Image: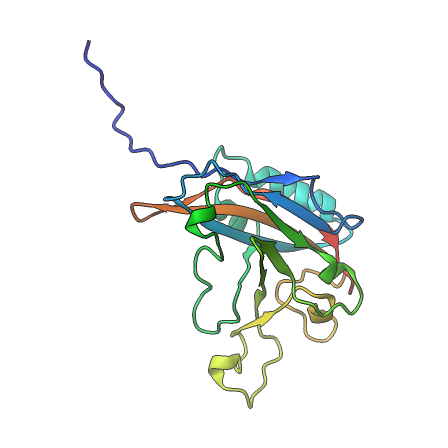
């Protein structure tokens, strides 16, 4: 009997992380993420996080619609998040180059272990909280930011530092940095917003980028 394959090349599978205790909500402003140690350490690299602000009044309905759109295909990746209006977080305030991929790197020796990652949303749910939002894992605390278009450029600031209208500037996710009333941040749909995150695993095999399915981390109402 002659055995024939279909001729389609297959790539290694990136297992998505799971959540311990469920998603974050306004009443539970934190989430614990469990890394899947079954990922091939020679392929898996780390994690990416995407965010979106929703109108706080309609956030539940709007997110449900987006989630159905994201998972309308069997193996969604980051492109499904982008299509739903989600934006990639940044780990550095870089004006002329993008944050490297993956934004949250996992050391090779730890990739095939089970470990926890944690993310607290308190920075957006507490009045005047000016702390940086951080992803905590393996003893590291990595802050991350949102890249938005500058609606109020400083004409005296060099162009490479966001001195021109339309250039990217970098803000934290804290309540003090959510600016709508005077100069509307380009990622805020309205003054009263809720914040949603997805996390997605990233790997590379033979120069091909690989992604896990996105995992929703929750949505919380922001103080502003």
- Establish if 88 lies above or below 70: below
Which residue, as the protein is rendered here, is positioned at the far left? 2
Tally the numbered discs: 0
Question: Which residue is more in the foreground, 23 or 59?
Answer: 23
Q: Position of residue 93 (x, y in %)?
A: 53, 71
Question: Which residue is more in the foreground, 116 or 186?
Answer: 116
Q: Position of residue 8 (x, y in %)?
A: 29, 30
Task: State the quadrant of the C terminus.
Answer: bottom right
Q: Quadrant of residue 153?
A: bottom right
Q: Position of residue 78 (x, y in %)?
A: 49, 48
Q: Residue at x 55, y 90 (%)?
A: 156
Q: Position of residue 87 (x, y in %)?
A: 55, 57
- Establish if 155 lies above or below 127: below
Which residue, as the protein is rendered here, is positioned at the far bottom? 156
Colouring of the image: rainbow
Q: Residue at x 57, y 40 (%)?
A: 69
Which residue, as the protein is rendered here, is positioned at the far top? 1
- Establish if 160 lies above or below 91: below
Q: Is residue 69 visible?
A: yes
Compared across the picture, whether 148 is left or right of 2 comes to right
Compared across the picture, whether 146 is left or right of 205 comes to right
Compared across the picture, whether 139 is left or right of 63 comes to left
Task: State the quadrant of the N terminus.
Answer: top left
Q: Residue at x 29, y 45 (%)?
A: 206
């Amino acid at each position: 009997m002659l055995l024939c394959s279909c001729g389609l090349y297959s790539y290694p599978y990136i297992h998505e992380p799971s959540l311990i205790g469920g998603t974050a909500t306004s009443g539970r402003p934190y989430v614990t993420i469990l890394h899947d140690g079954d990922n091939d350490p020679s392929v898996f690299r780390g994690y990416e996080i995407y965010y979106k602000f929703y109108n706080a009044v309609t956030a539940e309905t709007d997110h449900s619609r987006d989630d159905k759109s994201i998972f309308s295909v069997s193996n969604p990746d980051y492109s499904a998040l982008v299509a739903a209006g989600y934006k990639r977080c940044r780990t550095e305030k870089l004006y002329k180059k993008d944050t490297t991929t993956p934004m949250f790197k996992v050391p090779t020796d730890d990739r095939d272990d089970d470990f926890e990652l944690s993310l607290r949303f308190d920075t957006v749910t507490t009045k005047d909280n000016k702390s940086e939002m951080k992803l905590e894992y393996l003893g590291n605390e990595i802050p991350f930011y949102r890249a938005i278009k500058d609606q109020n450029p400083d004409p005296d600031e060099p162009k490479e530092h966001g001195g021109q209208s339309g250039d990217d500037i970098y803000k934290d996710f804290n309540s003090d940095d959510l600016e709508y009333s005077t100069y509307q941040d380009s990622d805020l749909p309205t003054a009263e917003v809720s914040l949603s995150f997805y996390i997605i695993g990233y790997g590379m095999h033979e120069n091909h980028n690989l992604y896990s399915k996105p995992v929703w981390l929750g949505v919380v109402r922001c103080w502003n």
